[in-house]
Amino acid sequence: MNWDDTTDADAAERLVDSVADREDQAVEAALRPKDLDEFIGQERVREQLDLVLRAARARGATSDHVLLSGAPGLGKTTLSMIIAAEMGAPIRITSGPAIQHAGDLAAILSSLQEGEVLFLDEIHRMSRPAEEMLYMAMEDFRVDVIVGKGPGATAIPLELPPFTLVGATTRAGLLPPPLRDRFGFTAHMEFYEPAELERVIHRSAGLLDVEIEPQGAAEIAGRSRGTPRIANRLLRRVRDYAQVKADGLITRDIAAAALAVYEVDARGLDRLDRGVLEALLKLFGGGPVGLSTLAVAVGEERETVEEVAEPFLVREGLLARTPRGRVATPAAWAHLGLTPPRSQSAGNGQGDLFGA
C-alpha cells in the first residue's frame, strides 16, 4: 500500500480524487509500508531502487539522487520515506511551491545532516533561482550564498554534507534537462493493476481491523482507478457502510451497494465523469464538441472538465481529444447503455476520432 500526492477546490471533494485531503494524510501515516518488502506494486521500480540502495550501503556512501514521477496517489512520498529508512537516515520533507527564493533553499540545505534525505515534492514548481542553486548542490555539494546587492555583492561558498535528494513530480516534462540529468536514478510510477490493488486493500483492511472477503476487495479494487490512495479511501467509506447497514463484513454486494451510495460506478466514474459523458452523448450526439461548450453544458468550469474529469476518461478510452473537439468513443456509449447515432455506428466520423 502506497500513496501520495489539488487541482481544483471542487476536485478535492471527490471520492475518486487522487490528491490527498487531511483525512487521507492522517490515515496514510498509519498505513504506509516501512520498507521495500512491504511496498506493494511497482515491481520494476522496486527492483531497480533496491539495487541502488544496496549498492550505496555496501559502499558506505549516500545514495544517488532519485527522481520519482507519476500521477498523484501512486506512492512517491511513501517511497521517499522508505529510501530514508533503508539508508538509516533522517528525512526532511518540503515542496517546490514552498521554495520561492534561493535563500529558502540555502537555509534548508545548510541545515542538512550528512546522509540525510531531502524530499522535495512537486519539484517542477520550484522557482528558477532556487532551481539553479540546486544544480551545484546536487553535483558538488556546495552552494554560493550571495551577500549584499549590486556591485558590492559577494558570493560566499558554503560546503554541504553529502545528502540524497528525492524529487517527486506529476509532470516530469516540466523539469529542465539540466536538473533532470543530475538525478542518478529516475523512476516513472505506473497505475496499478486490479490484482495489486486487491493486495493493497487486504493489507489496509488488516491494519484498520476491517473484515473483508476477497470478492469485496475485488469490487473496491475495480473502482479505484488504478490508484492505491483511492482504493484506501473507498475502503474506508465501504467500511462505514458495512458497519451501519450490515454486520461489518465487507462482501461484494456490500461494497457495490456502498459505492452506489457514493456514486462511484463499476468502472470508477463518479458524478462529474458521468455528467461529462452524458452531456457529450445526449446533447451533442457524441461530438465533436468544444471544451468550453461541453463545460457549460455540464455546469462546471472549463479547467475542472479539462484537468479533473478528462484525464481519466481519456485513459479509460471513453473520450478522445481531437483537433475539432471532444469525441465520445464506442466504449462510452456502451458504458452508459446508450445507442450511438447511425452515422457513428456505421463508422462515419472515425477521422474525427483518430485524426489527431
Image (tube, rainbow, N blue to C red):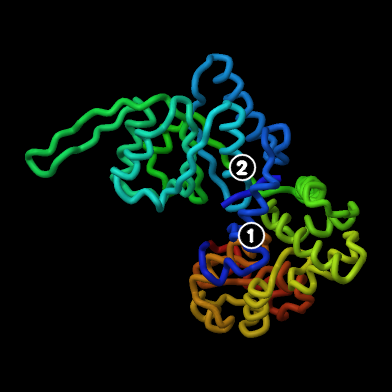
Q: Position of residue 356 (x, y in %)?
A: 53, 61
* Secondary element at image label 1: helix
Q: Quadrant of residue 295?
A: bottom right
Q: Position of residue 142 (x, y in %)?
A: 31, 28
- Comparing 269 with 331, the one in front is 269
Query: Are there few (<14), some (14-19), or many (20+) residues within 10 Å of tag 2?
Result: many
Residue located 57% across and 41% down the image: 188
Q: Is residue 275 found left or right of 215 in the rendered image?
A: left
Q: Is residue 164 found left or right of 340 in the rendered image?
A: left
Q: Please name the amino acid that badge 1 sits on.
A: Glu
- Comparing 332 with 214, the one in front is 214
Q: Position of residue 174 (x, y in %)?
A: 42, 49
Which label number is shown at residue 154? Answer: none
Q: Residue furthest left?
A: 151
Q: Quadrant of residue 76?
A: top right
Residue located 67% across and 33% down the image: 35
Residue located 55% across and 20% down the image: 56
Q: Is residue 193 found left or right of 292 in the rendered image?
A: right
Q: Please name the amino acid that badge 2 sits on.
A: Thr
- For disc 1, the marked residue is 23
- Comparing 253 with 88, the one in front is 88
Which label number is shown at residue 78? Answer: 2
Q: Quadrant of residue 244?
A: bottom right
Residue located 54% across and 29% down the image: 89
